[in-house]
Image (tube, rainbow, N blue to C red):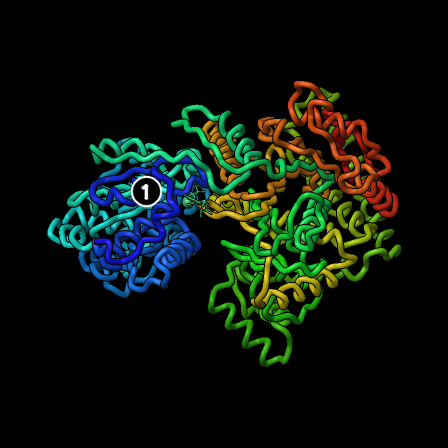
Amino acid sequence: MGARPTPYLEGLNPAQREAVEAMDGPVLMLAGAGTGKTKALTCRIAHLLNTGRARPNEILAVTFTNKAAREMKDRVGAHMGQSVDGVRWLGTFHAICVKQLRRHAELVGLKSNFTILDTDDQIRLLKQLIRAAGMDDKRWPARQLAGLIDGWKNKALTPAKLGAADEAAFDDRGKALYAQYQHRLKELNACDFGDLLLHMVTIFQNHPDLLEQYQRWYKYILVDEYQDTNVAQYMWLRLLAQGHRNICCVGDDDQSIYGWRGAEVGNILRFEKDFPGATVVRLEQNYRSTPHILAAASSVIAANSGRLGKDLWTAEQDGEKVRLIGHWDGEEEARWVGEEIEAMHSGTRARLRKFSLDDQAILVRASHQMRAFEDRFLTIGLPYRVIGGPRFYERLEIRDAMAYFRVVISPEDDLAFERIINVPKRGVGDKAMTDIQVTARTNGVSLKEGARIAAQDGLLKGKAKSGVAQLIAQLDLWRYLYSNRGNEDVISDYDAEISELASKLGVVEAELALMTSKGMNVKEDCAELLLLAEQLKSQIKVLQSYVEYLRSDNDVVLAEIILDESGYTTMWQNDKNPDSPGRLENLKELVKALDAFDNLGGFLEHVALIMDNSNEEHGEKVTIMTLHGAKGLEFPVVFLPGWEEGLFPSQRSMDESGQQGLEEERRLAYVGITRAEEVCTISFAGNRRVYGQWQSQLPSRFIDELPQDHVDILTPPGLYGGGYGAAQSGGFSSEASGAGMSAAFETRVEKADVYNSPGWKRLQQRSQRSGAATNVRSGKGGHMTIDAK
Ligand code: ATP
Ligand code: MG
């Protein structure tokens, strides 16, 4: 030993060094954000290699995301002063398990070239099984079963191992369906994501000789982000480490943010039980963030109960306080962040140095928040990258919705028509589609016209025929509306129709009133009349929405009509998959984006240009990503937008998991703040537009939990008329002594002359222009709700 230099050890503190040099036996490193856990872990790998304890292929190193894995490899290389090749077993759990499973697929009845199903395939397969079992797949949706099965797999439960409670799931047939599903997968030579781990655990459990071989092979095991492992992952690790017990896990219970995916913080507690005598290393010095940022993060996380608890300190001095700013609405938030990023880039912010775009990141709670930033940055030409997940306009639901818009605007857009003809399902299978294509080709017309002919000529049958006929009629109607916005003749036609229906409704209602006065039981005796009244009402409502659209000055309402009438929105509403609520939010966000354009055509052109721009170019870029994806990363400058009740903490996670859900959200807030090295900016908007309705937003409760002494409240330039920083507050104590932060902000909003703000004026102009009534009521704490009718 000692033959090779070990410069990487120099930079470590004693506790880190202990973790690096305690090479044999179990090591658990439990420490807060930014304390150098990943650094110690990567030094440990370098040290193992450098001292000849292990060859590169004898190290198993697991982390959570592909990005984190890449970064880990780079860091090891940096410590060694050369890039490391041959660390074959460094990657995510999934990536490593795929490699293992390809070698031993036959042991679970698969061939080594098995395919990995994506969610769509998985759902389709489950649906077939549900129907084959004679169940109604509307009442018992495949997505729900998929969620159950994923949950079982995360807990390493094969069908045989399910407990009594689980057996009763899904109308008592969960277990049988799960078993059938696994069987079908084998027949198809396929597996799903959950299987990758489950199969490997099963293989290792049933083949001790093979397990032994792997235990000899992986001399050292290292795990980053250990707090987010689920039971199946833990079992896999434990099996592999049982022999030599050379396992080093690092994590932070305060950063456990995957409970919803089955991660169990309990694994941290189990570790010391399963690996008695483990060296437990605690790190307390944070090397990443300034004292203010650290104080803010610690103060927020302190509100959680049941923490393992730990102190963090930093040797750094001063720095910028955490910056907090409230905006009028989400669009202004995006505009402001864009300006800030440019100012930081050119180094024109007082007290702050110059930052490259690569140094700056926007971390959002929900992916639909990205849209406003992407649009804004494209408009001002600020280069950005979106990490983890497609960019907004590349998402499935957005592409579908845009395809609808495209067909309305250009009926000859065959690609778009093909995309939507059977989404939602209209009974158009492969055969019907081929018939339509052939009809279009022989008649020399577009696919849409081909479909019209095929439906009329009786080429299409049954459900396909009626489904296609209805779609064509709808497309014609939407196109008619689109071509006639602002056309007074058309409006008065619709108005006449509405008054005709209204007078019919009047007659029906009078009749009903008469019956009631005669003492008849209207519900039972006049069911038909009641039904008629309902039908008239809904027809009137539909026509009114057309008139509203024709009178408006952009295509927002039309987009809503298209998404509703086509059944596209309903399709996602009925979908029980965990991503569906997110997709619905993205759709709302899409409609919101339309507001800024005069018409759909202009909007589609804008998006086409965006997509073109998105071709990878080199150079500095701002990063946009979700908080979940940002785990383990760090940036000198971090923006945390959308800190509003319902958005962050997310209403969904509170509804679904109550207090636990809230605590997980709070850990996510902790993860967010601790990503920042020098400048951390938290923002929220007072209003967000949700489906044509302005909704007032309350600042997040996490804002109340920020420590006042470590926060600066910034003043948005638009809202108060002053330039940036001119009216900067000296802290909260002057604002609202002792009161929480949002109280301070609310006072601020009340005092502010919001009626003169540009946002307010724009709103007023818009509503006057469209002749719509705008109803403003004063909301809680000086916030306002504006219902644009
Ligand atoms: P997280 O919980 O967010 O994953 P972490 O504990 O893994 O954080 P690292 O990413 O390893 O922390 O380290 C945070 C920052 O501190 C990195 O920039 C790292 O280079 C630096 N750092 C870690 N240890 C030291 C040290 N002993 N001296 C100087 N800098 C250090
Ligand atoms: Mg880390």
**Residue 135 visible in the displayed image:** no
Q: Position of residue 746 (x, y in %)?
A: 73, 27
Pick whichever, 55 or 316, lies toward us: 316
Vertical comparison of 205 with 477: above or below = above
Q: Which residue is mark 1?
A: 17
**Residue 254 visible in the displayed image:** yes
Q: Position of residue 359 (x, y in %)?
A: 57, 52
Pick whichever, 277 or 103, lies toward us: 277
Q: Residue at x 76, y 39 (%)?
A: 725
Q: Residues within 10 Å of mark 1 (few under 14, many from 20)?
A: some
Pick whichever, 487 or 560, lies toward us: 560
Q: Amino acid at mark 1?
A: Arg
Q: Residue at x 40, y 55 (%)?
A: 75
Q: Quadrant of the C terminus?
A: top right
Vertical comparison of 614 with 265: above or below = below
Quadrant for residue 163, please give it.
top left
Q: Position of residue 78 (x, y in %)?
A: 39, 58
Q: Residue at x 28, y 59 (%)?
A: 99
